[in-house]
């Protein structure tokens, strides 16, 4: 049926009444209440905990004392940074950032002093007394102020397990103590809280004097070995023909199918002869389980002909333009026409961390002291 003019349909009247209701202010919905409840305590992480996750090293996830950053700002501690550069040199590959894979080097990466200062203010626990203090005060506290500090810290191996052909060793870090009668032969060492009980029942103080003297002689022998090294060095410096050379060893690779990394110095003169120092990396396998045993060795090579036998003693020291941590060891060799090269001797650096630092640098700087021992 057609609609009659002048009359309104029911639907139109209904929508008109709804529009009038929408114009009323009281029709607006009530506002939501502001939520004032706090989050649970387990989700309320402290600021220093959040900063520890932001400022940590991208490799070892530890807070860096010395911090480097790549071109994109990713952070690395000095130890991991040198390890990445050393692995790149050994594999003849360009080292990259573990996060963004951009190239890293000594020139492209820079120190981040802001991160270092922020990390130094974060709290840490003393490893002996568990008191909380800023990181920049922890070393002085543990070395000078802490009453629970002991001179020796041992790492006890508690388990060895295998996973994907890698040998992992799990270590438990504890604070042991030695017996106060250790100088007279007591071999006991253990937890600090058990030391008083052991010392109360220790039988070494009641031993006869001959056994105590034997124990003291063993300690004196070890001390004498350390003194003997310095006496040998002082006696070498008293010889007539003594010279030293500050050398710079540069890396190069062999032309073999599997290239090997070597270091070699330029020729230098000493005792009317030409000499060369060559070094190589020991335990340079790509297996990460062997990288903790990485070390350097070197040999001394005489260039030219030798008419008479030539007895030489030599030792390597830290150079004036390097920061190598080395323990001096005296080596000797008899040069002749049939033997103009020494065997590879260990370069007595501190540990594998020091080796990675040397491999990460462009050159290895050392001072070589040579003494011509004349046969009487």
Image: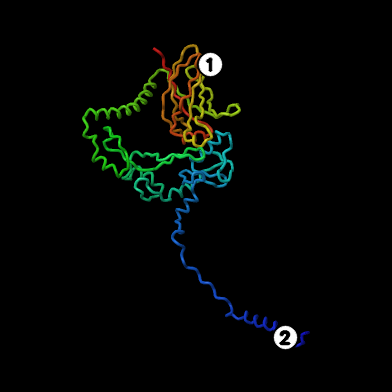
In the image: residue 244, left or right of residue 201: right
Label disc, if present, on residue 103 of the rendered structure: none
Q: Please identify, in this view, whether the residue under mark 1 or under mark 2 is nearer the observer.
A: 2
User: Residue beneath label 1, please?
Assistant: 304
* Coordinates of residue 327 in the picture (x, y in percent): 41, 30
Q: Is residue 277 above or below residue 13?
A: above
Q: Quadrant of the C terminus?
A: top left
Q: Quadrant of residue 260?
A: top right
The front one of 62 and 373 is 62
* Number of numbered discs on residues: 2
Q: Is residue 37 above or below residue 300?
A: below
Residue 226 in the image, given as x and y percentages of width and height? 35, 28
Q: Is residue 357 visible?
A: no
Residue 119 appears in the picture as rendered:
yes
Q: Quadrant of the N terminus?
A: bottom right
Q: Secondary structure at mark 1?
A: loop
Q: Position of residue 363 (x, y in %)?
A: 52, 31
**Contact between labelled residues 2 and 1, with CB atoms less than 8 Å apart:** no
**Label 2: element kind:** loop
Q: Quadrant of residue 266?
A: top right
Q: Residues within 10 Å of mark 2 (few under 14, many from 20)?
A: few
Residue at which label 2 appears? 8
């Amino acid at each position: 049926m057609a609609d009659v003019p002048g009359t309104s349909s029911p639907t139109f009247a209904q929508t008109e009444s709804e529009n009038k209701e929408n114009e009323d202010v009281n029709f607006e919905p009530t506002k939501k209440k502001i939520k004032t409840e706090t989050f649970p305590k387990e989700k309320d992480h402290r600021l220093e905990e959040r900063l520890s996750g932001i400022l940590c090293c991208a490799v070892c996830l530890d807070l860096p004392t010395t911090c480097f950053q790549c071109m994109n700002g990713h952070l690395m501690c000095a130890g991991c940074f040198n390890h990445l550069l050393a692995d790149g040199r050994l594999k003849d590959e360009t080292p990259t950032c573990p996060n963004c894979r951009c190239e890293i080097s000594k020139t492209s990466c820079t120190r981040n002093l802001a991160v270092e200062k922020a990390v130094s203010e974060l709290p840490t626990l003393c490893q002996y007394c568990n008191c909380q203090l800023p990181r920049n005060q922890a070393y002085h506290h543990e070395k000078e102020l802490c009453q629970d500090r002991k001179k020796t810290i041992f790492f006890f191996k508690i388990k060895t397990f295998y996973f994907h052909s890698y040998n992992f060793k799990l270590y438990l870090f504890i604070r042991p103590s030695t017996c106060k009668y250790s100088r007279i032969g007591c071999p006991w060492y253990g937890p600090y809280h058990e030391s008083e009980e052991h010392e109360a029942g220790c039988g070494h103080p009641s031993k006869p004097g001959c056994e105590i003297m034997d124990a003291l002689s063993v300690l004196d022998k070890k001390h004498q070995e350390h003194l003997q090294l310095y006496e040998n060095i002082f006696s070498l410096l008293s010889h007539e023909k003594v010279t030293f050379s500050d050398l710079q060893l540069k890396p190069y690779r062999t032309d073999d199918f599997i290239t090997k990394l070597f270091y070699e110095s330029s020729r230098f003169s000493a005792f009317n002869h030409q000499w060369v120092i060559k070094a190589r990396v020991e335990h340079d396998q790509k297996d990460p389980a062997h990288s903790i045993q990485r070390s350097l060795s070197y040999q001394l090579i005489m260039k030219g002909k030798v008419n008479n036998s030539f007895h030489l003693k030599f030792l390597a020291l830290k150079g004036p333009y390097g920061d190598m941590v080395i323990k001096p060891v005296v080596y000797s060799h008899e040069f002749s026409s049939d033997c103009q090269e020494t065997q590879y001797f260990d370069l007595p650096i501190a540990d594998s961390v020091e080796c990675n630092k040397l491999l990460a640098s462009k050159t290895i700087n050392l001072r070589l002291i040579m003494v011509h021992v004349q046969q009487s």
